[in-house]
Image: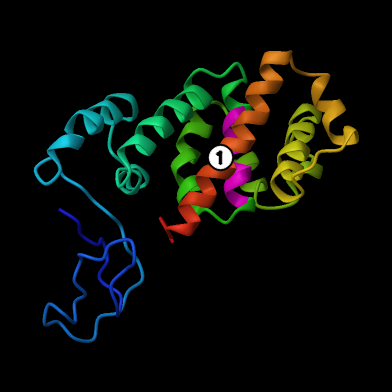
């Protein structure tokens, strides 16, 4: 079954052409742009195994994965990749979640931010640090020197793409080669996630 969480727009969404608008269903005057694709195993039995795997790994099939399931190969590959980034990373959990939250702030992805605040708190980040990520975090005294170096890298990768030696070299002093690869991959991966979320207006 495909449905909308908050209502229908004035015209059918191009990605959900089979979903009628409220107007078409005889309910005039409703105009909402908040669309979500939701699938149940009854409607798409071929997705049942994939959904079960997502639930086993992540606890539930979130709104993000409900949209990803429009393309089962994408959903499967996405899940494997992001599981490696988050759950098999050599980067300390607090730094990893700090990076994810900062990317969400920079890319205006509130769904990503809100989803990771509990993970950040569990990893030991203080609420003060989480709040500071909304400002000039890379220069905030709330963060340690190491954290500010990581935030500078995150900001530069996200905003400028190219990373000068003046930003990258200080980060290298704190991490092994594997940790550097995992760190850079985390920034890159969650830029991908946030851009997917914002394009589909998930959480907006």
**In this view of the protein, can residue 27 be seen by the observer?**
yes
Q: Residue at x 20, y 47 (%)?
A: 39
Q: Residues within 10 Å of mark 1 (few under 14, many from 20)?
A: many
**In this view of the protein, can residue 142 be seen by the observer?**
no
Q: Residue at x 66, y 46 (%)?
A: 133
Secondary structure under tag 1 reads helix
Q: Position of residue 75 (x, y in %)?
A: 36, 37
Q: Position of residue 69 (x, y in %)?
A: 30, 43
Left or right of 4? Residue 194 is: right
**Residue 7: within the magenta?**
no
Q: Position of residue 97 (x, y in %)?
A: 57, 33
Q: Which residue is mark 1?
A: 190
Q: Which one is nearer the viewer's eye here, 197 or 99?
A: 197
Q: Is residue 75 above or below residue 13?
A: above
**Residue 100: within the magenta?**
yes
Question: Residue 179 occupies which quadrant of the picture?
Answer: top right
Q: Which residues are magenta?
A: 96-105
Q: Residue at x 67, y 46 (%)?
A: 132
Q: Residue at x 27, y 62 (%)?
A: 16
């Amino acid at each position: 079954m495909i449905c909308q969480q908050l209502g229908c727009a004035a015209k059918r969404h191009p990605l959900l052409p089979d979903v009628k608008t409220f107007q078409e269903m005889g309910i005039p005057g409703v105009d909402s742009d908040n669309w979500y694709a939701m699938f149940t195993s009854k409607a798409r039995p071929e997705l049942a195994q994939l959904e079960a795997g997502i639930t086993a790994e992540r606890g539930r099939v979130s709104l993000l994965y409900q949209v990803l399931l429009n393309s089962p190969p994408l959903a499967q590959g996405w899940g494997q990749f992001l599981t490696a980034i988050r759950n098999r990373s050599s980067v300390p959990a607090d730094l990893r979640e700090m990076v994810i939250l900062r990317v969400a702030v920079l890319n205006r992805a509130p769904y990503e931010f809100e989803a990771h605040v509990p993970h950040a708190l569990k990893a030991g980040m203080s609420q003060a640090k989480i709040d500071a990520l909304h400002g000039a975090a890379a220069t905030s005294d709330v963060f340690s020197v190491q954290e500010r170096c990581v935030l500078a890298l995150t900001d530069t990768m996200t905003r400028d793409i190219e990373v000068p030696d003046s930003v990258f070299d200080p980060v290298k002093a704190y991490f092994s080669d594997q940790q550097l690869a995992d760190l850079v991959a985390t920034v890159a991966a969650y830029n991908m996630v946030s851009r997917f979320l914002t394009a589909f207006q998930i959480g907006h």
